[in-house]
Amino acid sequence: MDRFQALCKRLHEKEYKLTPQRRVILRTFINYETGHLSAEDVYGIVKKQHPEIGLATVYRTLDLLAELDILEKINFGDGRFRYEFASHDTHHHHHLICVNCGQVFEFEDDLLDSLEQAIQIRNGFNIIDHQLKFYGLCKKCQEK
Amino acid sequence: MDRFQALCKRLHEKEYKLTPQRRVILRTFINYETGHLSAEDVYGIVKKQHPEIGLATVYRTLDLLAELDILEKINFGDGRFRYEFASHDTHHHHHLICVNCGQVFEFEDDLLDSLEQAIQIRNGFNIIDHQLKFYGLCKKCQEK
DNA sequence: TTTGCTGCAAATGTTTTGCAATATC
DNA sequence: GATATTGCAAAACATTTGCAGCAAA
């Protein structure tokens, strides 16, 4: 069973219908694995093969997939939400955002674990999740 | 010279006019030092004393103050921008956001400095800034 | 008196919603 | 065939902008 089929099964298990629109959107995320796609991005890609699809359907599908923990809805601060496959290890998965070209790079690190523990103790705050974003210039943009 | 006067002076130095609207908005941030106010929040507060003020003026003033590095414009992911006095030490100033009551707490830490250096070397990414947010339950909400 | 600033209303851009038609199960 | 899902258009929401009048310097 490939990745696409596994995702379809997850929808099916939760009694959600497998519509062509949902299939196409799932496939898009598989094809654009490295991209951090906005609703509009997905709409633009999907419309090429499926011109009759509505933007509202894209939004509804993305919300659904985020609720099912298939996608993660992320706010990069550029005025729209972006989606990527949920890593299920969000604690060690962070983003490097280039302020010049807007590209988003990923990196893994577990340095924050000890910081979290310190905060829990010092502030009595029970931490569920965190978000760490670095802004700067990627290699290419530095060269220019 | 008190804080308010110092801020007025900064506007004056940059050739910006000291209008009553700007004064009132500055005072609001002094009075709500601990709050992370949205444009709508500021508008609601200011309108009590100054009913004729326009929302657009609030937005324009907040943008101006952010540009002058007096305020910092922050995206907490709740669908609107929020503003607070710029700390001038953003690298060590982070936020704890309670997912239940929405309150925002602050904390300081310099643990990320070494992580930043590692990223610069490993990824060739020139880091200018970072944002670190922790989501969880504050003490009070845990007790409920 | 000269700009810069304001308030208003209209425009913008993203996301959500109401609803009748449609497709999945 | 029942019900979830769709596409469309309109609404909602935060924010921005155009512009004529106004006010700070």
Image: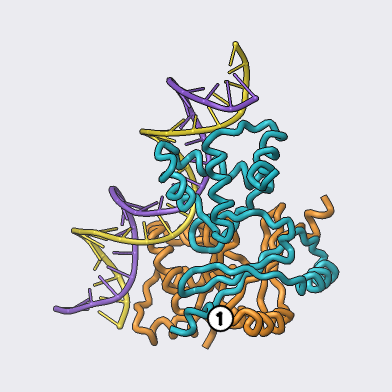
Chain colours: A orange, B cyan, C yellow, D purple
Which element is circle 1 on? strand
- Residue A136, percent across and down? 75, 59
Q: In this view of the protein, which residue sits in the foreground, A123 or A87?
A: A123
Specify the amino acid type for callout 1. Ile
| Residue A91 against residue B36 in the figure, above or below | below
Residue labelled with disc 1: A128
B125 displayed left or right of C14: right
Residue located at (77% from left, 61% from top): B127
| Residue A53 against residue B42 in the figure, above or below | below
**Residue A13 in which image quadrant:** bottom left
Q: In this view of the protein, which residue sits in the foreground, B138 or B129?
A: B138
The chain letter under disc 1 is A
| Residue A96 against residue B60 in the figure, above or below | below
Badge 1: few (under 14), some or many (20 or more) residues near its Cα, within 10 Å? few
A101 displayed left or right of B34: right
Let me know if residue A48 appears in the view: no
- Residue B67, percent across and down? 66, 44
Residue located at (34% from left, 83% from top): A15
The total of numbered circles placed on residues is 1
- Residue B108, percent across and down? 70, 69
Q: In this view of the protein, which residue sits in the foreground, B20 or A2?
A: B20
